Amino acid sequence: MLKQTDRPVPPSGLTDGPAVLALDGITKTFPGVKALSDVSLALYPGKVTALVGENGAGKSTVVKILTGIYQPDGGAILMDGQRAAFPAPQAAARSGVTAIHQETVLFDELSVAENIFLGHAPRGAFGLIDRKAMVAQARGILDGIGAQIDPDHKLKDLGIANKHLVAIARALSIDARVVIMDEPTAALSHKEIEELYELVESLKAQGKAILFISHKFDEIFRIADNYTVFRDGQLIGDGSIGDVTEADLVKMMVGRDVSQIFPKRTSRPGAPVLTVTGYAHPTEFEDIGFTLRTGEILGFYGLVGAGRSEFMQSLFGITRPSAGSVEIDGVAVHIASPADAVENGIVYVPEDRGRQGAILDLPIFQNVTLPSLGRISGRGFMRLAEEFKLAREYTERLDLRAASLDTHVGNLSGGNQQKVVIAKWLATQPKVIILDEPTKGVDIGSKAAVHAFMAELAAQGLAVVMVSSEIPEVLGMSDRVIVMREGRIVAELAGPEMTPETLVRHAAGI
C-alpha cells in the first residue's frame, strides 16, 4: 500500500514520470464475484493508456471506481501522488476526472447546450442559469473539438454521430485532467473515427491523461502510448505499446494463443430456405432481393446509412415494407410482426442488445426462455426445471460467463449480454438467424467463441445472415457477401471477388 506522501511508482515497463491519476492495489468484490483483485493502473499527462481485456476482465469496474460510481474495498486512489477519494461522481468530476461512455445518457428534448451543461450550468444573478453564457461556452467547447453543431438546436434533431460529439463535449465541459474513453468509436463512421483520433491528439497536446478502452486493436496501436491488460479481475501486464505486438496482447488477454479468430469451415449450402423478392420501404431501402440456402452464412456489408439494419428489421416484422415478398422453403409467408417471423422460423439478434435484445432487469434464464415459453409450460404452469435446462444448454454452448443463471442480464458485460440474446433466439430452433453486428463491442476471445458457434450452426444446416461493418469479419465468416449502398444492393460477391478493396469500392460507390 502506498503512503499518502508517496508518489505512485509507474507499473512495470512504464517510465513516464509521475502519474496524474493512479490506482494501487485496488480490490472490489460483489456478492459471489471478485471483480478486481489487487490491480494497479497509472495515467500520465499527455499520454494515452489503452486498457485491454476480455469482457468481464474488470475494465468497467475500474472505470466506475475512477468516476466515483463504485467505491473500492481495498487499495488506494491517488491524484498527483496524494491519496484521494471519490465518494460520488461529483467528487471525481471536481478532481478533473471525466468519462465518455459508449452509451451516454442524453436528453432529446433539451438543446445541445443544455445537454452539455446539465447539472453544472453557469449561473448569473440570483443563482439563475445564465443561458447566454451557457450557449457561448458550449459553442467554444464544440468548436474546440471541431464539431459544427449549433448549441441551440434540440438534440433530437441530430444524427447519431453528432449526438456522440455532444456527449464528448459534455465530458469536456468540466476542467478535465483525466479523460476516460470507453469504446468511443462504436457508433461512428470511418470519417468520424479519423476526426476522433485528431481530437485525441489535441487532448494529448493539452496535457490531458487519457484512458482508452477499445476492443479494436487497430485503434489501440494507432493512438495508444501505453497499455495495461486485465484478465479475470487481475493485472496481467503493462508497458509501452511499442514493445508489444497484437499477438502479445491477445495472449495476455485470453491466457492462450489465438492464432485464428475465424474458424476453418467447409461450406456446403443446401436447398433454398429464404427467398426475398422486390423488398422495399418508402424511405429506407428499395428492391432488395436474394436467396439464402441452408448451411450458408450470407454477409451484408455497407457503410453507415446503407440501410442494412433497416432492411433486417423489416424482414423480422418490426417495420412494414411497402412492397416485396418472402418465401420460406418455397412457400410464400406474410410477416406483419416479429411473432409472425418467429413462427415462420426467422429470428433477429439486433445490434442494440440493451434496448431491443434483452430485458436487463430479468435473470439470464428468463431472458433465454422468453420466446420458448410454450415448450416449457403446461396447463398454465411453468416447468422451472425444464426452463433452467433449456437456458443452461444454450448458454453453455456459447460459453456464457456468469456467476449463475439467476444473474440479471443488466449485470453482465456487453459480450455476455450478446451471448444471452443469441441463446434466446437459438432456443426457438429457427431456420434462419439474422445476426446484426454480432460481435460489436465484444472482446477478441468472445469474438472467437461467437464465430466458432456461427460456423457450428451453419454446419448443422441453419441459414445465417450476418450484418457486419468489420471487413475481416465479413470476409472471414461469409460464403457470399451482399454489399448495400444508399438502400440498394450494389453487388453480390463470392469466392475470389471477396476482397477488402472490392467491398470498399462497391460500398463507397467508387
Image (cartoon, rainbow, N blue to C red):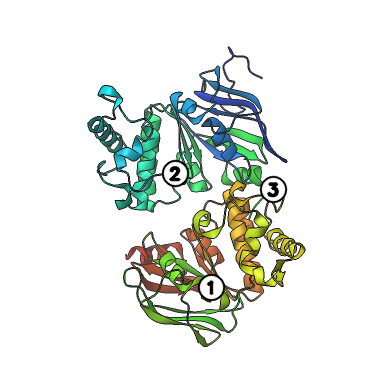
Amino acid type at circle 2 is Thr
Q: Which residue ends up furthest to the left in the rendered image?
A: 132
44 shown above or below 497: above
Query: Which quadrant of the figure contains the C terminus?
Result: bottom left
Residue with the mark numbered 1:
339
Where in the figure is residue 340, as x and y percent of width and height? 52, 76
Of label 3 and label 1, which has the lower sequence position? 3
Give percent across and percent down for residue 295. Answer: 61, 76
Depicted 216 relative to depicted 358: above or below: above
Image coordinates for residue 317, horizontal then vertical, percent: 47, 72
- In contact (CB < 8 Å): disc 3 and disc 1: no
Residue matched to label 2 = 104
Q: Residues within 10 Å of mark 3 (few under 14, many from 20)?
A: few
Separation of residues labelled 1 and 2 (CA atoms): 31 Å
Q: Is 82 left or right of 381, judged from the image as shown?
A: left
Q: Residue furthest bottom?
A: 331
Could you tell me the amino acid type at mark 1? Ala
Q: Which of the two residues, 49 or 96, is positioned nearer the viewer here?
A: 96
Residue furthest to the right = 385
Residue 256 is labelled as 3
**Residue drawn at 43 percent across, 82 percent down:** 325
Which secondary structure, mark 3? loop
Q: CA distance from mark 3 to mark 1?
A: 42 Å
How far is disc 2 from disc 3 in space, using C-alphas?
34 Å
Q: Nearer the viewer, residue 383 or 344?
A: 383
Helix, strand or loop at label 2? It is loop
